[in-house]
Amino acid sequence: EGSTYGLEGKVAYAWEGDVGGKGWASVIRQSLESAGGFNNEDAQGYDVGAKVSTGGFEAVAYYYTGEGIGSTGFLFDAVDAGGNTRDSDGMYAQLTYKIPGPDTKIGVSWGESNLDRGPADPASTALFETNESIVFGIYHPVTSALNLVAEYTKTEATAHNGNQADETAIALGAILFY
């Protein structure tokens, strides 16, 4: 029933040379129509990022922020029980190096996502406040379509009520590009 609007826009610029890269920025605005008698809200957010490469090195940096956008997935946990939007933000950074010859890539990445409580959320809510991960990886191309992968990941999650969860994982596998 009814309809809502959404607008998205993105700009990007790429360049080549001894130092190549790409920069981008995007915005989103999505109307949220309440089915439960709450106020209608607008979700809005933006993100910016850049990738720079030189020699065998590549660096990526990214940041996003939003109101009513949610976290983990679009509009997931975007509003509280009273229908009020929650603020969220996060960032990501990665540095890799491709070894000449075998083209094996080694790298490290770090990211964090934050979700604020809404006005109707109690201080004791188990809603996550911060998710943070660091990944160390080795990626070796077997063919142009197949990479072997080894990763170590350490993740920490903290809820608004102080509960914490930690996870450490080692992953061995392959990536198939098609």
Image: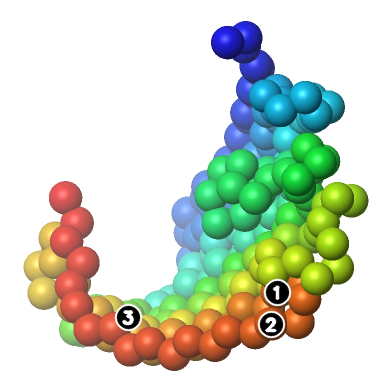
Q: Secondary structure at mark 1?
A: strand
Mark 1 closeness class: few <14, some 14–19, many ≥20 residues within 10 Å: some
Disc 3 residue type?
Lys
- Residue 122 location (% of width, % of height): 84, 62
Q: 3 left or right of 34? A: left
Q: Residue furthest left?
A: 143
Disc 2 residue type?
Asn
User: In this rendering, does residue 32 appear at all?
Assistant: yes
Tell me what residue is drawn at x 22 percent, y 84 percent: 172
Q: In whole angstroms, how far apart are the C-alphas of marks 3 and 2?
A: 36 Å
Quadrant location of the N terminus in the rendered image: top right
Disc 1 residue type?
Ala
Tell me what residue is drawn at x 86 percent, y 50 percent: 120
User: In this rendering, does residue 114 appear at all?
Assistant: no
The residue that disc 3 covers is 105
Are the two marked residues, 3 and 1, in contact with CB atoms closer than 8 angstroms?
A: no
The residue that disc 1 covers is 159
Are the two marked residues, 1 and 2, in contact with CB atoms closer than 8 angstroms?
A: yes
The image shows residue 17, relative to residue 147, as above or below, that is above
Q: How is the image coloured?
A: rainbow
Q: Secondary structure at mark 2?
A: loop
Q: In whole angstroms, how far apart are the C-alphas of marks 3 and 1?
A: 35 Å
